[in-house]
Image: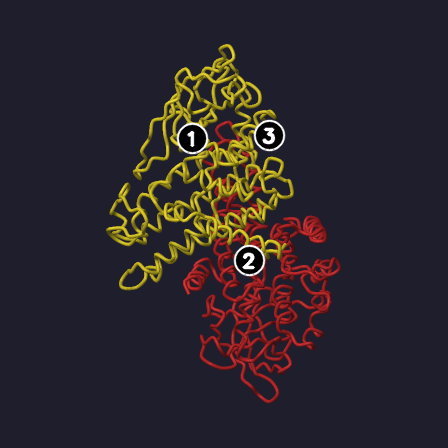
Chain colours: A red, B yellow
Amino acid sequence: MDFNFTPEQDTLRDQIARLVRDQNDFDTRRKVSRSEPGWRPALWSQFAELGLLGAPFSEEDGGFGGSAVESMIVMEEFGKGLVIEPYLQTVVIAGGFLRHAGSAAQKEDHLASIIGGERVFAFAYSEPKSRFDLNDVSTTARREGDGYVLNGHKAVVLAAPFASHLIVTARTSGAQRDKGGVSVFIVPKAAKGVSTRDYPTVDGLRASEVYFENVHVPSSDLIGEADHGLPLVEAVVDEAIAALCAEAHGAMKVLNQTTLDYSKTRKQFGQPIGNFQVLQHRMADMFMAYEQSVSMTYMVTLKLGEPETARKMAASAAKVQIGKAGRLVSQEAVQIHGGMGMTDELNVGHYFKRITMIESQFGNTDWHLRRFTELSNG
Amino acid sequence: MDLHYSAEDLAFRDEVRSFLETSYPDHLRSRASRDEVTKQDFLDWQKILYKKGWGAPAWPKEYGGTGWSSTQKYIFQEECARAETLGIPPFGMSMLAPVLMAFANEKQKSYYLPRIIDGTDFWCQGYSEPGAGSDLASLKTRAEKDGDSWVINGQKTWTTLAHFADWIFVLCRTDPTARKPQEGISFILVNMNTPGVEVRPIITMDGGHEVNETWFTDVRVPLENIVGEENQGWTYAKYLLVHERSGIAGVARSKKAVERLKHIASIELDRGEPIIRNPEFARKVAELEIDLTALEFTELRTLAREAQGKGAGPESSVLKIKGTEIQQRLTELTLEAVGVYGAPYFRGFPMEGGNQFPIGPDYAHHSAPAYANMRKTSIYGGSNEIQRNIIAKMVLGL
């Protein structure tokens, strides 16, 4: 058992932290988020140059021989800086599909350009009525000739406005909520019949409603086995959850520090408000919530390779804990900042909104608590 | 980063497991579930561990400890919990011993430490007083020099297992004129057989006798029984409070208790189905399991930091708060699970040699007293509110 980072991992963290600090300070991030195109391709290229986009890939896949731990480090630092750029969608999710199930040709086609920063992916899985169930898919992929024809509507596809390619779940057989019959495709966003409606999200990201109207996809763009895509989707989403947990605890760390600093300088009744025990205990609770979140991020990251049930329980446990901790930390941070915490001017509200959105990304606390309970009790 | 046990660790786990299977005495197996454990039970188990060379898992080798890695210590705790062995009382082993190692003279170390590890001496802790609970530094028990003796007068309270103890370590006021209350305190070792020491039982609401009042009336002990320097006792007392962290979270025992709770919840019926199928109940159990996982990994991170010599420091307050909250919730949910059979009360009922209790299922019979008893955990060892003060001051710098 080992909870230490390697010197290479420490270096990676230092590099990202420096880059985020220098290039993604709060004002810059806010400005980028509120202007077009809503992200910085130039920053993305810098990520590629630094090797971040290849960090979790094996050397034979053209990466730098890392693992989920590397993605955890990247996402934690990105969480601290509220980084907009779609590492999660491109490297963790699309990269995950390719690592787990990509054919040699698919890997050759996509991995080098992901690692090199040329291609950006988005994950089109949720639908207007699917809520958080990954098997609830009504987008169809009808077999035709040597390929498939996709029709359907995917909801709130994060990073889709930036993406060159989409990973799409579609039903190749069965009824809307069947566990069988789900398949996964790679679809260039420029493919004929794909249209999007792009918009900003409350936490400063960008997303799209994505519509597929008789989109022809060759069989060579099916990832994994037709009809049996769900276990693959679940595995990749659990990896995405681990990465999100890291992002969340990075964001919580900043909120805790900001709140603590504020409590030491803000004076009321003739003294810093941090002198008041009623606030001290709440900040102690925020500290504990953060510590438990770090622990759960490590836990899920290190258990991603476990058998399916154990992996799912780990991911759900982490998501539940981080969901609750995020609520506590973000709400208390605003409260302890008082009126200033409500403003757009301070970073507090921006972290508040991102943490709030993470809670419902890939299943909210209630959804994961139910999944954990069902798995735990057989 | 890696969660897997090495081949050596797995071999060690097997060794511990088979040792516990063959060497843990049967008479303690049945007694572990009894209402009260005797002093002899504790000493017997300690002697067995000592004979095996495992008398002090957490001590350094030079004092007779095992020299185990933090992973091995963790495995040992897990296996003891799995086998439901008696716990080792912390007072000598993990409270006093680290203070002696850090601050006592050679003569004291070579006399007291071996007697802790081989199960000769049973220790208790003389900290709290009727007027000094969370505000421990306001303690009044007085030690005055008279010739070659300290003469101690005063009263300690909540002295856990004082009725078993051969020795007590006592915080005494030795300089009542000191500028600050923390500055006039000394750390003195007192043999419980010394004339003037009197132990009076306190019966807690669960009906049990764990804690006592300990009275000191003109108790004379040699001057050499002081640990470290005169009036520096507060430093040692605090060292003890933050140093006692191995196992403070109680993770391994709580994991076993979750298993037991889920077993009970798979038998107890609610609307004709096991109560674990009741979504409200199942949700509470799941939240508890998740919190316990978070605590477990927080402890593992703490152990990893300690192993690197970085020291856990005041973060151990997190382990104390979360660990005790979980222990409390476990007994609370167990009591909820057993339903009406939480009520029958059998303390002191003779039931040697078996699990056959006269009324209700055997797992139910102690559930209400256990629930009542565990309320102590958020009060003792520095109340959970004091722990939050420690976090605020030592970690957050407030």
Do discs 2 and 3 share a chain?
no
Q: Is residue A332 above or below residue A78?
A: above
Quadrant in the picture for the C terminus of chain B: top right
- Residue under pointer 1: B165
Q: Nearer the viewer, mark 2 or mark 3?
A: 3
Instruction: Assess disc 3: are there few (<14), some (14-19) or many (≥20) residues with their C-alpha within 10 Å of its C-alpha.
Output: few
Residue B192 lies in quadrant: top left
User: Judging from the image, what secondary structure is the residue with disc 1 in?
Assistant: loop
- The CA distance from mark 2 to mark 3 is 38 Å
Q: Which mark is residue B102?
A: 3
Q: Is A187 in front, or is A153?
A: A187
Whether residue B97 is situated above or below residue A23 in the rendered picture = above
Query: Residue B210: x percent and y percent?
Result: 37, 35
From this viewpoint, which residue is outermost toward the bottom? Answer: A145
Is B349 located above or below residue B337 in the figure? above
Q: Position of residue B115 (x, y in %)?
A: 52, 32
Residue wearing tag 2: A300
Would residue B278 appear left or right of A86 to someone viewing this image? left
Q: Is residue B48 left or right of residue A41?
A: left
* Chain of residue at mark 1: B
Q: Amino acid at mark 3?
A: Ala
| Badge 2 and badge 1 in a common chain | no
Chain hosting mark 2: A
The residue drawn where x is 59% and y is 31% is B101
Q: Front-most of A261 and A285?
A: A285
Three-letter code for the amino acid on which mark 2 is drawn: Val
